[in-house]
Image (cartoon, rainbow, N blue to C red):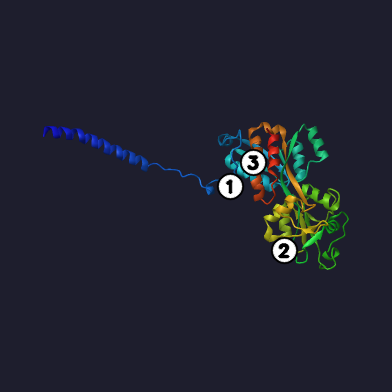
Amino acid sequence: MIKKRKMIRLIVPFLVFILMTTIVIAGCRAGTTTTPPPTPDSTSATTPKPTPNSSPAARTSLSGTIEIDGSSTVYPITEAVAEEFRKINPQVRINVGISGTGGGFKRFVAGETQISDASRPITSSEKEQAAKNNIQWLEMSVAYDGLSVMVNPRNTWVTTMTTAELKKLWEPGSTVKRWNQIRTEWPDRPINLYGPGTDSGTFDYFTEVITGKAKASRPDYTASEDDNVLVQGIAGDPNALGYFGYSYYVENKAKLKLVAVDAGKGPMLPSEQTIRDGTYSPLSRPIFIYVNKAALVRPEMKEFIRFYMTGGPKLVTEVGYVPMNTSIYNENLAKIQ
């Protein structure tokens, strides 16, 4: 009997210890939240994977201000890239303006901005001004665009126009003011023209390939460097005709009607395919950013350009433009190493 009690005294504490340990472990498990692995929907579709020499921790510690100005055509791409970049680098301030390609280059060659959006290549005079101010730069192609000719959806008579008809309408000294002056079967109604302002690279490119000389255009049209202004003008005017970058059509399809352009091989509408393969001719073109080389010593600048070339191609498609081949983006990346 004594032996049994002794054994009980030995066993009970041991059982109590086991019971208390079990309760503590269970309590710890109950108080722990297990984070499930991220699902495809829980991660940003537009955030690229970290690139070499660029860890997420390094990104979030970046700070500074990046000034960008220039083309309203390139603006949707650059603004989308900036927005995604700011999500993972909230201490970096990025200001994106839309003064037009020419206006952007004026600031860029003066050293006022670090990046210039451009819908045409830099001109000889702009290069000379940059050299005078000791501004060295890098040119980077970022997408393809197709200049799109647009009318109001209530326009039932225009579906195609030849490049010769566009020239007749837009060239300096043009006296065409009514639709039946282009084709006699079209109605005797006024034509109200809308297009980019003279600081726009889109204006330069369109006039060069349509009227035969850059900046050669009739002046009596509603002009703006902001393509959204042109969208609203055409959308509200049944007699309107205008042109601007393809992305702005993609974003406003319900308000606008595309006109197929015939350069001699049959009417062709802009699309991702026809812009990419060049069959939408002569209005397909590359668009660019220009980067101040000296600014690349700043970590936030270098990281932003790296992010642009890795995450940008997906955003190019999302905003309505056509991405370059991957090799082009890789070449751009090599320029900043």
Amino acid tagged 1: Ala
Q: Residue furthest left?
A: 1
Q: CA distance from mark 2 to mark 3?
A: 38 Å
| Element under disc 3 | helix
Residue 113 location in percent, x, y? Answer: 71, 38
Label 3 Cα crowd, 10 Å radius (few <14 / some 14-19 / many 20+): many
Residue 101 location in percent, x, y? Answer: 76, 45
| Residue receiving disc 1 | 45
Going 72% across and 33% down the picture, which residue do you hit? Answer: 293
| Residue receiving disc 3 | 310
| Element under disc 1 | loop
The image quarter containing residue 298 is top right
Relative to 26, say whether 266 is above or below. Answer: below
Q: Are marks 1 and 2 in contact (CB under 8 Å)?
A: no
Amino acid tagged 3: Thr
Label 2 Cα crowd, 10 Å radius (few <14 / some 14-19 / many 20+): many
Amino acid tagged 2: Pro
Residue 104 location in percent, x, y? Answer: 75, 42
* Residue 153 image label: 2
Sequence order check: which comes first, mark 1 or mark 2? 1
Q: CA distance from mark 1 to mark 3?
A: 13 Å
